[in-house]
Amino acid sequence: MKLKLLLFLVMLFPISPFSQDAASFFPHNEGDTWQYLHQEFGEGWYWTRTIVKDSLDADSSHQIFFTSSEHFYSKHFIIDTLKQLWNETGIPELGNFLDFKLDANPGEWYRCDTSATYYQNPFYKIVTDTGLAYFLGKLCKYKIYNSFQSLHPENYPEGALDLAQIILVDSLGWFSSRYDFGTDVMVAARINGVEYGKFVDIESTEEPVLPHSPELPAAYPNPFNSTIRIPVKLPFTAEVRLSIYNAVGQNITTLYSGKLPGGKHDFQWNGKDETGRPCATGIYFIHFEADHLISNQKIIMIK
């Protein structure tokens, strides 16, 4: 009886690690701050953006104003009542640009340059994927948008010129963009007073924190007694598999399998196998696969 009641309550109130409001893919609270690492042509630098004003107009659309340490990013965005995010470009020929349909589903495409005259070919976005993953230590729903030009968007990707891949993350916002010439990846955020990741002092840093290819830095502490931390660095979104093997090559447990966005991620192994049983003292190996790269690292557990 108790089990039936529990199942009934779960059906009524589904447990979800992310909100159900499409607009939360672009947080819009005054004071919200994001920091990104921009990399292009082998160089990298950090930049920060902050919401200085969020006000509802007569149509109940959000008018969002940013200040940014990078001058080439737009300062004014609009979230209308249809959960569409508009970018006020400041370019008369382009007008307002439909950046994102926040409630779009996988396979749904839409035209962005609605004034029609600025680009030689029409400019579109399409949602290519959605799912759950960890971002800055928080389990969130994400959406991946591909921007492209095409005369026949209904045939995407056939005949399309891909321009960028953008990831929006529920409750964190615009997480990353990947272009032919470089990337922007969120390294820290302060949303509604809650901080995620670690902000970098822009004035005192010169070196970017992300590698040019997937990387498995040294796990620590090593040797370890009960728990070992395993950092992973990715310059872009990649399919990742992170596993633990014993000294004779048997897979003890898989810590993660799936897509991860570019950035630094931290995992932990508690010294237990896939069934939850403690493993014996000895030598083990971290096995890391990402973007066709394979790395192995020896670790020692001592009890």
Image (spheres, helix red, strand yellow):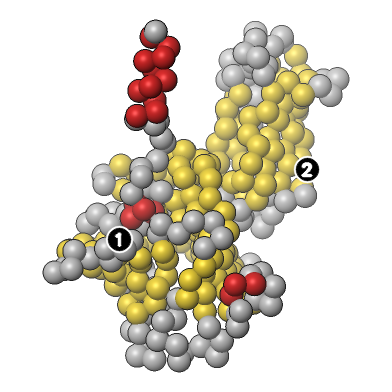
Q: Which residue is mark 2?
A: 294
Q: Position of residue 3 (x, y in %)?
A: 42, 12
Tell me where residue 297 sits by quadrant: top right
**Quadrant where the C terminus lies?**
top right
Q: Amino acid at mark 1?
A: Thr
Rendered position, 111 above or below 142: below
Residue drawn 42% across and 20% down? 7
Tell me where residue 48 sits by quadrant: bottom left
Seen from the viewer's position, the closer of residues 118 and 4 is 4
Residue drawn 30% across and 61% down? 50
What crowding class fits label 1: few (fewer than 14 Cα within 10 Å), some (14-19), or many (20 or more)? Answer: many
Q: Amino acid at mark 2?
A: Ile
Tell me where residue 222 sits by quadrant: top right
Q: Which residue is mark 1?
A: 50
Q: Position of residue 264 (x, y in %)?
A: 55, 45
Residue drawn 24% across and 54% down? 29
